[in-house]
Structures are given as C-alpha cells and as structure tokens.
C-alpha cells in the first residue's frame, strides 16, 4: 500500500545572527543554513496495518507525513501510495487519502459542521447513497449528531477533533494519516477516538499511520511502530519486539513481613544466584530498594543476565513472601530513553522488515 | 467533467458568499469609505474642469468624467477581489496544508472563493450605484441611457477583468512564500495599481510615451478598458481588439501563475508544525 523509498527533506533558510547587530547583518548576508529534517528514510506498509510513527518533537514525523500526503516534495527519494506518487500527482493521491492534523482543522470555521460535510461530499465526489451510509457509520462511532448543526468555531476541542476525524473519512479513504489526533483531549474523548480508529480499520481495512506522543495510543492501536530520531529511522518492528529489544529490565516487587535488611538480602541473593552459575552475577546488576511504609522490597535487573525464575525461587527461600508482582519496562520509559538518545546511537536496528 | 468541476468548486464560492453575509458590518464600513473616495474624486474633477475652462480634458467631457469616476468605482469594487491576502494568511498560519490535502487545485479554489465575493459585490452596492448613475445621467445630465449592447459588452469585459486581476494577484501572492508577510508590499501594489489601471486618473491623461508602455502591461485591461467600452469610446473593431487583448492576458497570467506555482511548491515550507 505504502512504499517509501529513501526520502530526504532538506530545508534551506537564511542564516540568522543573534542580537540587533545580527539582525542588521542578516539584511546583507546571503548565507543559507541547510537543515536535514528527514534523512534517508525507507519503509513499506501493507494494506490494513496500523502503524505508529513516533519520535520526539522536531524529529521529522510531520515532515514525513507531509511528504506522503503530497504537501511537501521530498528533496531526494520518492514515495508511492497505492502506486501513486504524491509529489507529482497530488490531486489523484488526495482523493484516496484522509488526513487529520490534530493542531489544525480542515473544516470551515464559519459554517455549521453539517455544511462543512456537504462541501467535502461535493469535493470528493461522493455519491448520495455512499454519503448517507458513511454518515450513519460515523454518527455511530463518533457521536456526531449531538453537535452536527453547530458552527465549527463553537465546538469544543474534543468535538472538533471527532468532527475532523469524521471529515477525513467521508470519502472512505484507503489510507488515513493521523498527526497527533489525541493531542489535548480528555481521557474519555481519547478513548472514543481510539475506538473509532480501530473500528474503521477493522471495517474497511483502512491503512492507518499515526503519529503521537501518547503511549496509550500506540499500545491500544498499533501492531507495528516506526521510531525516528533526528530525521533518521532508528527502529521499525512490532511493539513486542521493541519491548524485547529495549525493555529488558524487570522489576520484582515483593510484600514481606520480616525484612532482615537490604545488606543481608543482597548477600543471600547473590550467593544463591551464583551457586553453580558460570557467569557470576555482579552486585551492581541487582538493584534493591526497600519501602518500609508498605514493607515492600523492589528488585530491578536485566532479564537477559538474570533469570526471573531464579530470582523468585531464591527470594522465597530468603524471606517470607506475602505478595509478589513482576513488572516489565513500560513503553513510556523505553520511548523516553530513545528520545534521550540513550539507545538510538548504538542500539541495534531492531526487527526491521 | 464540467459538472464535477462545478460541484467541486461551487462550494468555495457559496461559502465566501455566506461569510460575507455574516460579516456585513465590516463590509458596509468599507463601502462608506469607498463612496467617500468617489465623492472626493468627483468634486476634484469638477473643480479641474471649472478652472481649466475647457469642455474636454484628456478626451473626456465633463459629463463623461462623471460617468468615468462612478464606473471606475463600480468596476474596481466588483473585480478587485484580493487573493494575495488569503495566500499570505494561508502561508503564515500554515493553513495551506489543509487545502493541499484535498483533491482540489489551490489556485482555482481561491478564484472560486473570489467569485463568491464578486457576486456579492456586484449586487451590493454596485448594482444600486449603477442604477443610480443611469437615472442621474438621464435626469440631471440629460444624456441618453446606455445601450443594452454596450452594457453587455461591458459585462463580458469585466468578467475578463476579474480573471486578469485574480490571476495577477495570485502571482503577486506567491511572493508570500519567500517573504512570509506581504502587507507592506500589498500597500505598494495598491498604490501602483490605482495609477496603472486608470483608477485615479484616466490613462488618456498620461503622456504618449507612458501610454505606449501601458499598452504592453495587463493593468489597463483591468479597469480602464471596460470603463472606456461602457463610455462608448471605442469603435466596434477597437472593442473587439480590447476584449481580445484581455483574453490574451488571462491566458498569459494563467500560464505564468502555473509556472510560479510549480517553482514555489518545490521549496514550499509549511509553517507551524
């Protein structure tokens, strides 16, 4: 469905100098600054996939989306959306896609929502019958009727976002681009939007590309994610693989009654784990914390170095366990690590396709 | 094909028409300001004719000058629908992206919007001022009513004028892609246009050399030509030539706009994320 072949986008802007003196200097300078917003990105997306496209602010997410929708022309490389190159055939591509930019609206600000929809129906050349059917479906999934006759500028952000999502779907597009569709929304509306996206994907096999900063969006919707940082693709694979590759830290949390003290537990634990183990576990590989208020012991370690089952069986012998909880690394903290460039520079390329 | 075209772009026109009806307060304020301009210009010319002591100046009699001043007002109110302002706003706020994601041509959608403005401005106030002018002509000036044929030619001519103006203004608006804001340039354009289109002074008042240059520019075709057709200053052959020249400008400016648009989209930067 979508074929992105090593696209790059370079922005050229006049060089700015600091201060008032700099501003004057800028008037006479012809120096230009080149910024590579997207650097040689390739991927392909199959029919009916929901792909999360994530990266920090300014990583180049929106720029990529804009190139795929035909708003911007790539400096190098090309992309094919269902066989159409949006850079050369924007209108043909636009007729088959739906786009929501969370920070903007494609609706007519001064008109009632119903009227905006009628205009879009005409623009996309949707037949009366299809329009009726699609509108009934959108009403059901997005609950549009409660504000269908209100002027767009009087809608709340949540209503407007639902309206915008509906507007992007009137012509039943093959590909849906969502650039931060849940930005600034409350939890209830977020859920509604996610449900709607899921339902549309299920019903029409619509391919969805979603950029977001909300981890829940990704966990609830995306089977596959692409992570970009500073314009380069640093991960492309399933969510499970990402967790497998980067989220190897496990945290065991144990409620206990008779806690003998951290030092004693650590000593007992290391000797138990190293018993018959060829590669001894170093002290710094286990992180122990005790919370006396809840009488809860927390142990963090890398599951590739230490077996979870070993730790648990050892602990049961050392202390009385009243309750036990095993946590895997949250996606949020993986993403945070990637954003902080802890993993991107030397991390593996991930389970790329 | 044509039906699809109409279906696609008609909403842009009707939307603009509706918007005008919603913000009529601002509109009437503009009309009052413009009418003031007409009065000033009227009294100024009357004073000039009085003091010169001549019957005709620049090929226009005093009565013709009255018609000229008012018809220039009507013509420019109808045809001068600014596209560059919208382009600049779209560029500054990044809204241009929202048009580009739709299967519509940006330029045609802008022009369609201005067709809505044109229809509105044709009715209020132009039609009323026009009727007033004709009544005034017959009752006070003692001139004959404009012939239906000439009025029809005038209407054909201003349709072309409108296209020349919006296509030119689109090219001008493209400057916004390079400078972002075009307010200052817009002011300069307005002043220049009021000279070059014959809005301020009839072209026939300019020295011969200037007029020769003007003949090769599109501005004369915007306002001066249709008003002269209305005044019956051209022979049949001249009228056909003038209208043909307008059509040629429409084609030239259309092609120029396409060319610039192609260049601009290559370096398009959408502002604001």
Image (cartoon, rainbow, N blue to C red):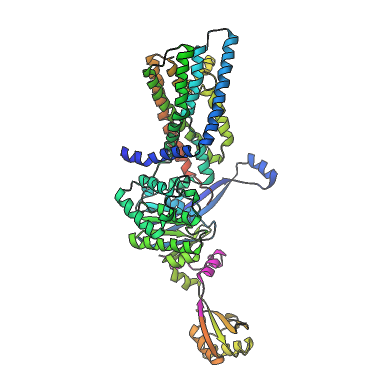
Position of residue A271 measured from the top left corner of the image (x, y, whole percent)? 57, 90
A112 w.r.t. A307: above or below? above
Let me know if residue A87 appears in the view.
no
The foreground one among B142 and B30 is B142
Q: Is residue A310 magenta?
A: no
Residue drawn at point x = 49 percent, y = 22 percent: B72
Q: How many numbered discs? A: 0
Q: Is residue A335 magenta?
A: yes
What is the quadrant of the C terminus of chain A in the image? Answer: bottom left
Magenta region? A326-352
Let me know if residue B55 appears in the view.
yes
Residue drawn at point x = 33 percent, y = 59 percent: A204
Position of residue A183 measured from the top left corner of the image (x, y, whole percent)? 51, 58
A226 w.r.t. A73: above or below? below
- Res. A42 image quadrant: bottom left
B267 w.r.t. A206: above or below? above
B224 w.r.t. B26: above or below? above
Q: Residue furthest front?
A: B139
What is the quadrant of the N terminus of chain A in the image? Answer: bottom left
Position of residue A101 measured from the top left corner of the image (x, y, whole percent)? 47, 53
The foreground one among B91 and A127 is A127
Q: Quick check: B104 left or right of B191? A: left
The foreground one among A273 and B57 is B57
Position of residue B50 measured from the top left corner of the image (x, y, whole percent)? 58, 10
């Amino acid at each position: 469905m979508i074929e992105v072949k090593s696209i790059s986008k370079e922005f050229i802007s006049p060089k700015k100098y600091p201060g008032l003196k700099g501003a004057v200097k800028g008037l006479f300078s012809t120096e230009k600054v080149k910024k590579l917003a997207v650097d040689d990105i390739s991927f392909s997306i199959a029919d009916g996939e929901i792909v999360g496209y994530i990266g920090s602010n300014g990583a180049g997410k929106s720029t990529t989306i804009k190139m795929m929708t035909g708003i911007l022309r790539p400096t190098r490389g090309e992309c094919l959306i269902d066989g159409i190159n949006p850079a050369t055939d924007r209108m043909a591509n636009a007729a088959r896609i739906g786009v929501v930019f969370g920070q903007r609206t494609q609706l007519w600000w001064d008109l009632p929502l119903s009227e905006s929809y009628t205009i879009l129906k005409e623009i996309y050349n949707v037949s009366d019958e299809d329009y009726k059917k699609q509108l009934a479906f959108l009403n059901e999934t997005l609950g549009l009727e409660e504000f269908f006759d209100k002027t767009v500028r009087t809608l709340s952000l949540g209503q407007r976002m639902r309206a915008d999502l509906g507007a992007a779907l009137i012509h039943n597009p093959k590909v849906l681009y969502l650039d931060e569709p849940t930005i600034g929304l409350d939890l209830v509306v977020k859920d509604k939007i996610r449900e709607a996206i899921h339902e549309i994907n299920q019903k029409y096999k619509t391919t969805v590309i979603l950029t977001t900063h909300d981890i829940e969006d990704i966990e609830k919707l995306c089977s596959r994610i692409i992570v970009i940082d500073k314009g380069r693709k640093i991960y492309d694979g399933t969510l499970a693989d990402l967790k497998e590759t980067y989220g190897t830290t496990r945290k065991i949390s144990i409620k206990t009654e008779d806690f003998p003290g951290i030092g004693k537990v650590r000593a007992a634990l290391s000797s138990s784990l190293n018993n018959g183990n060829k590669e001894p576990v170093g002290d710094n590989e286990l992180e122990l914390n005790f919370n006396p208020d809840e009488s809860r012991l927390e142990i963090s370690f890398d599951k590739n170095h230490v077996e979870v089952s070993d730790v648990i069986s050892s602990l049961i012998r050392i202390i009385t366990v009243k309750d036990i909880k095993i946590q895997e690394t949250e996606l949020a903290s993986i993403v945070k690590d990637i954003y902080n460039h802890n993993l991107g520079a030397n991390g593996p390329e991930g389970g790329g396709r | 094909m044509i039906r699809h075209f109409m279906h696609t772009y008609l909403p842009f026109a009707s939307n603009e028409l509706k918007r005008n009806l919603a913000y009529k307060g601002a509109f009437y304020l503009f009309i009052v300001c413009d009418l003031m301009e007409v009065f000033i210009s009227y009294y100024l010319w009357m004073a000039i004719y009085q003091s010169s002591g001549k019957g005709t100046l620049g090929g226009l009699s005093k009565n013709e000058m009255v018609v000229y001043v008012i018809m220039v007002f009507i013509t420019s109110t109808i045809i001068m629908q600014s596209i560059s302002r919208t382009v600049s706003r779209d560029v500054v706020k990044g809204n241009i992206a929202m048009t580009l994601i739709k299967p519509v041509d940006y330029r045609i959608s802008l022009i369609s919007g201005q067709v809505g403005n044109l229809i509105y401005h044709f009715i209020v106030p132009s039609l009323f001022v026009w009727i007033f002018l004709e009544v005034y002509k017959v009752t006070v000036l003692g001139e004959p009513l404009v012939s239906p044929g000439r009025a029809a030619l005038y209407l054909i001519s201003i349709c072309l004028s409108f296209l020349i103006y919006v296509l030119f203004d689109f090219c001008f608006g493209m400057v916004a892609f390079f400078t972002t804001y075009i307010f200052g340039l817009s002011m300069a354009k307005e002043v220049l246009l009021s000279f070059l289109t014959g809005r301020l002074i009839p072209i026939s008042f300019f020295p011969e050399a200037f007029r020769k240059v003007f003949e090769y520019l599109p501005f004369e075709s915007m306002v001066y030509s249709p008003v002269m057709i209305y005044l019956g200053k051209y022979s049949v052959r001249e009228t056909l030539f003038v209208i043909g020249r307008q059509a040629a400008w429409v084609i030239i400016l259309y092609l120029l706009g396409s060319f610039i648009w192609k260049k601009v989209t290559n370096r398009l930067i959408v502002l604001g994320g």
